[in-house]
Image (spheres, grey):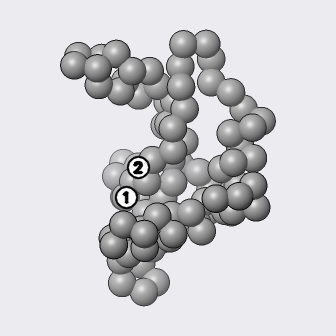
C-alpha cells in the first residue's frame, strides 16, 4: 500500500493475496472499513466504537495520517461484505 492506493485497489489486492478473490466484477461486494475501537473486552476482544465504510476512491493511508482516534482508542482497517455494513 502507498499513499496513492485507493480503498478499492487495496480490497482487490487483499482478496487476491489471500485467495479470496471473488468472480470477475464482484469485488464490489466488499468494502474497506475504518474501524475505531479498543482492545480489552471480555477475553481481550476488540470493542468497536465506530465503523465507517471507506469510499472506493478514498486513500486509506492519507486518511490515517490526517485523522487520529481519541486517546485510548486505536484504528484498524477491516474488509467486510458491503451488504453487512449497509445494514
Residue at 56%, 63% in the rendered image: 10
Check disc 2 and report the residue beneath it. Answer: 85
Please state if 15 lies on the left or on the right of 68 as rendered: left
Q: Which of marks 2 and 1 is in front?
A: 1
Q: Is mark 2 on a helix, strand or loop?
A: helix
Please state if 59 lies on the left or on the right of 46 as rendered: right
Residue at 60%, 68% in the rendered image: 9
Location of residue 75 by image quarter: top right
x and y, in percent, of residue 41 in the image? 30, 17
Location of residue 63 by image quarter: top right
Position above or below: 60 against 50 = below
Check disc 1 and report the residue beneath it. Answer: 81
Quick one: label 2, few (<14), some, or many (20+) residues within 10 Å?
Answer: some
Which quarter of the rendered picture does the N terminus lie within? bottom right
Residue 4 is tagged as none
Q: Is mark 1 on a helix, strand or loop?
A: strand
x and y, in percent, of residue 40 in the image? 34, 16
Quick one: label 1, few (<14), some, or many (20+) residues within 10 Å?
Answer: some
Residue at 61%, 13% in the rendered image: 71
Q: Farthest residue in the left direction?
A: 43
* Alpha-carbon span between mark 2 and mark 1: 7 Å
x and y, in percent, of residue 44 in the image? 29, 20
Tell me, yes or no, whether the two marked residues, 2 and 1, touch with CB atoms within 8 Å.
yes
Which one is nearer the viewer's eye here, 78 or 84? 78
Position above or below: 77 against 50 = below
Please state if 19 lies on the left or on the right of 54 as rendered: left
Residue 43 in view here: yes
x and y, in percent, of residue 87 in the image? 36, 48
Location of residue 2 by image quarter: bottom right
Residue 49 in view here: no
Amino acid at each position: 500500500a502507498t499513499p496513492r492506493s485507493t480503498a478499492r485497489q487495496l480490497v482487490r489486492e487483499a482478496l487476491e493475496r489471500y485467495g479470496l478473490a471473488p468472480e470477475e466484477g464482484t469485488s464490489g461486494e466488499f468494502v474497506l472499513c475504518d474501524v475505531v475501537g479498543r482492545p480489552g473486552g471480555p477475553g481481550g476482544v476488540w470493542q468497536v466504537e465506530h465503523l465507517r465504510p471507506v469510499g472506493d476512491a478514498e486513500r486509506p493511508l492519507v486518511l490515517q495520517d490526517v485523522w487520529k482516534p481519541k486517546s485510548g482508542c486505536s484504528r484498524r482497517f477491516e474488509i467486510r461484505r458491503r451488504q453487512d455494513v449497509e445494514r
